Image: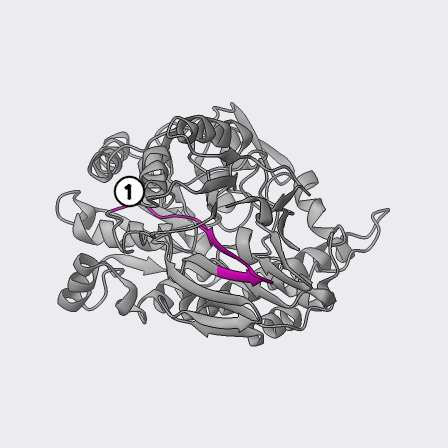
Amino acid sequence: MLEIQFFGATAEVTGSCSLLRVGDLQILIDCGLIQGSAEEEARNRAPFPFEPKEIDAIILTHAHIDHSGRLPLLVSSGFRGPIYAHYASRNLCRIMLNDSARINEQKAERAGRQGGEQPAITPLYTVKDADQAVHAFHPLGYDDRRKILPGVELCLRDAGHILGSSIIELWLQFGTTRRKLVFSGDLGRRRAPVMCNPARLAEADLVVMESTYGDRNHPSWESSWDELGSILHQTAEDGGNLLIPSFAVGRTQDLLYTLNRHYRDWGLDHWKIFLDSPLATKVSELYSHHLELYNPEAAQCWRQSRSPFILPNLRVTRTAEESMEINQIHSRALIIAGSGMCDGGRIRHHLRHNVWRRECHLAMVGFQVQGTLGRALVDGVRSISLGERQFEVAARVHTIGGLSAHADQQELIRWYQTFPAGPAVSLIHGEEEARRALQQQLERLRARVSCPQYGEVLDLLAHE
């Protein structure tokens, strides 16, 4: 038996989870949290479609919660094997899984206090579960090929998406049959502010590839930064505040780095700048310890300025009280806060104080999953619900698609073309419209492309 079964991120962009079977061995590639509407997130509580105790090993592409977020649940359900990941991913997961566990515990506690007719709920997983998951990590560096199980060799290559993000190369031996399997993970963009370009690979029998932006191309980095500069200028002229919901890992660091580089050009000395995300603050501090993973330009910037994430007037707010004080400022406050899709975190607090003000602006800088508040704002919703109150959306909403840390359609195609033999491709981690669009483009290159559905099994013995 040599096969893959897909249990997540099929026709959606969260919940990545694929099961590889090599004879009697079972290897899980990612185990991510399902994100989106309340109904979609409720799927995280469903039993795993496999027996966690029977999984021999897990390989993690990177630390984003939609790829790593159910690892503690897997451990609490009986998994006892090793988790292979880049050492920076292990360090990020120590922060992120702990944060996710605390959020789960707090949700359960609030539900318990509310009482009423609602049944008591238990956390999806606890801080103790998260700690046990992190202890199971076996950290690796890039380009270090090693045998992890009988007939299974692994090498991680730089995916250029976030710190420690990895393309997975697997050499599989089953009897006399050998197959080379590649999981792209989430591929980054070329010429990103901090990260290196995605590694180029030479061979594979099958490539399992993401397709988040399989139906569109990003504007250039330069035009995207120009757009952000224009939004800052316009917000200052209007006399309001600028809110940027930002993902704690990757996007926030890119923003801080670029604000540093354009500090004088954009007149940022006339602004009060806030990083209002304890998680993003911890992650930025961790980024500061991994200079060896930066691209050459970012590494040089670090050497010249000690930290490319620090600005003269940046205030890092750690407590809830400090966060609330920000809302006493009604003009020229640049507020970077989580969560990136506006479904939780301190950004919701700032939306309550700013989204109904016509002079304020909101810059969306990341992919917004269907069913999230961020997606509703991008789609032009006229009013939003925050807690028990309804708010008119009067602030101007900007979508800066070019700041994504995901490769776009053209970059995905170019990355695939680095495989000279044109291997078969399975597209995951993309909404259906996006991956079907990418499928059409790849088939024009005469690639054999599949778009697996949930639970579908792909026989690797059929791929020559």
Residue sitting at the far bottom: 135
Q: Is mark 1 on a helix, strand or loop?
A: loop
Residue 262 relative to residue 438: left or right: left
**Image location of residue 155, percent across then percent down:** 42, 64
User: Can residue 197 be seen in the rendering of this structure?
Assistant: yes
Q: How many labels does the image show?
A: 1
The magenta stretch spans residue 188: yes
* Residue at mark 1: 332
The magenta stretch spans residue 327: no
**Image location of residue 249, percent across then percent down:** 41, 56
Residue beneath the point at 73% across and 56% down: 50
Type of residue at label 1? Arg
Q: Who is closer to the viewer here, 106 or 218?
A: 218
How many residues crowd mark 1 within 10 Å: few (<14), some (14–19), many (20+)? many
User: Can residue 15 be seen in the rendering of this structure?
Assistant: no
Q: Who is closer to the viewer here, 68 or 333?
A: 68
Residue sitting at the far right: 117
What stretch of residues is rendered in magenta?
171-190
Kindly indicate the quadrant of the structure image that contains residue 223.
top left
